[in-house]
Image (cartoon, rainbow, N blue to C red):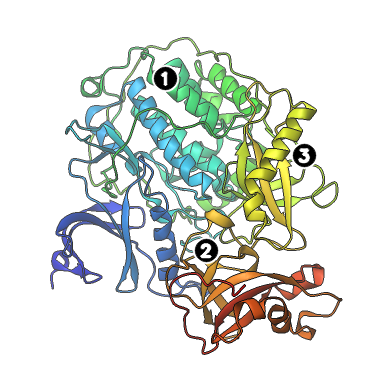
Amino acid sequence: MPRDERVVAGRYRLRQRLGSGGGGDVWLAEDEQLRVQVAVKEIDVPREPDALGGDPAARGHKEALKAAQLREHPNVITVYDVVEDDDRPWIVMEYLPGTRDLRAVVTEHGPLPSGEVAGIGAAALDALCAGHRLGIIHRDVKPSNILLAPDRSGAADRRVLLTDYGISLWPRETRVTQSGMVVGTPGFVAPERLSGGEATPATDLFSLGVTLYFAVEGTAPFERDTLDAALMAALTSQPDVPQRASDPLCRAIMGLLAKDPAERMQAAQARELLAEAAGTTTRGAPSASAGADATAGEPEQGAASDGSGPGQTRGSDEPGRTDRPDGSAAAEAATDSTAAGATRGPSDGARRVPGRLAAALLALAAVLVGGGGFALGAVAYHDEGAAAQGSKVRAKAAPSSSPTPSPTVTRSAYPYGRQVGLREALTPGQCVDADWKDGEFEGRPGLKLVDCHDDDPEGQVIATVAADSTASTSGTEAVRSECARRTAELRATMAAPALSVLTPETGQSEPPASACLLFLKNATLGGPLGDYRKFGDEVYVTQLGPGDCFDEEEDEDGSYTKTLVSCDEPHHTQVVGWTWASGDGSSDSVDTADLCDEKYGVNWARGKGHEMWAWSSSDEEWEAGFRHVLCTVGREDEKKLPAGALKPAY
């Protein structure tokens, strides 16, 4: 069968290849069940297991599922389905004719007006922040991954969509590329990634800054003739201040391009500046159509559109909600970078860089001199391979005075205090690990954001409460009372809950909301709690409580995998409550089933063909003091209970 007539997963008939993006080809396909056109992206993973013995296809499928989690966001591609065919995962997305990526638009028309770039940046930033709140790092933000689609009236380029989450990874997850390779595009990858650091929300913000610079100037700040030069420029060179950008857009771009992630502008301040820039005029920047007639600079190699996939309707150009306050250090970094760049001479690229980057330069130099190059797992140099050759327009604008910072509100670089260590405000649903410096559940813990599903979190933000900026004693107590009220129902289902209320540091004119966090005494949560779980999720004992239902599957080692399901569907077991194992014996020395039968059996299991089952946490947590036993009811023949929650006899 010809490639263009292939049917994927027995449903999606490939019609035409639209392009190639990071990690795979994108096809126009017909959904033969619904008779509609869709875009289908094949995730390109190795056929053989990697050196660590992992299954590349399984990891690729897991990565594809991440894009689907953001399907409701107006500035993220809409994912309809994730299927597997020929041992490879495929993402099925909405098809939008007339969609172009930002690189293709700038290559065709030249630099875009400052206000238009700011609107695009605000939409992309909101999409990134939505992913960051879920712990998803994009890792390859660049012009060809920002799509401009027609609006519902047919007006071109009015809808802004971030695409290609196919290579995104949870912060602590194994890379899908080969060992030692960095996912990203030369010239757009943050310097801390090039020096071996982890991907974080700050690395995405750096790449967004490079992308906006490209859109408003027509060339990327670290674009060079060779891969080696581009990498060295990203590590060492301070970019020229963009001359075509309005003052607020310029401040946003330069703040996002700070080399040190700790000094990089945070999302909240960038959002404010982009909103301001979207409503201001540019410093002589022509329209997109006029840009093509600008004075041309030296010829440079262009790049083809990757066609990496269409997306869903953009709801509004207005920036999204402000969830994360910025730090004063970031604002200072933006000011310093902006002020220094207007008269940059040829030697400015030799500015001293932090020690960590200096060490990275030595290592990079050794690789380059040895001829080994630098491995970038997502794409080759010059973005998507330079299918389109020609001269890119480099607009020449008269230099103007350096932009100066506008007044900002008073915020702390550490919104909850330096001891807590977080530089961004917490939002409901986020998971954390905690370092209790003043004793367990006492004082302000040092917090670290972790993935709710993969990192066995210690705690979770259940709700946030608007804080009293005076931080008075009565105000603090009111916040604690409100947190207790909002978490009461969930705490009633937990074995040993511990409520911790994190209030903002004093002295901020716009403090973040206080965070209501739940922990377990002597145990970790194991995953998200309450409404932050989803049916179909694998769950652990510590995530469950009365009223939950789950299916179970025995593993080869004798343990059980538990999957949360609706009680309105047939299910293996229903949770009825917790009991406690007294004494100090090991979990093996306690008949936990008897404990559950004694406490709940008469009311739930007697004479109905039902029996009580018991579940305990790990041996380590049992020995640490979490001797709570989860009691459930199921059928004696181990078949599924019928749909509908069971009721007690009395």
Q: Secondary structure at mark 2?
A: loop
Q: Residue at x 69, y 61 (%)?
A: 524
Q: Secondary structure at mark 3?
A: loop
On-image quarter of the N terminus: bottom left
Q: Which residue is mark 2?
A: 179
Can you say whether 534 is above or below 464 in the image? below
Q: Residue at x 77, y 28 (%)?
A: 474
Can you say whether 583 is above or below 295 in the image? below
Mark 1 and mark 3 lie on one chain; the one further toward the N terminus is 1
Q: Which residue is mark 3?
A: 419
Q: Secondary structure at mark 1?
A: helix
Can you say whether 163 is above or below 241 in the image? below
Mark 1 and mark 2 lie on one chain; the one further toward the N terminus is 2
> Quadrant of residue 451 in the image?
bottom right
User: Which residue appears farthest toward the front when viewing the image?
Assistant: 650
Q: Nearer the viewer, residue 134 or 48?
A: 134
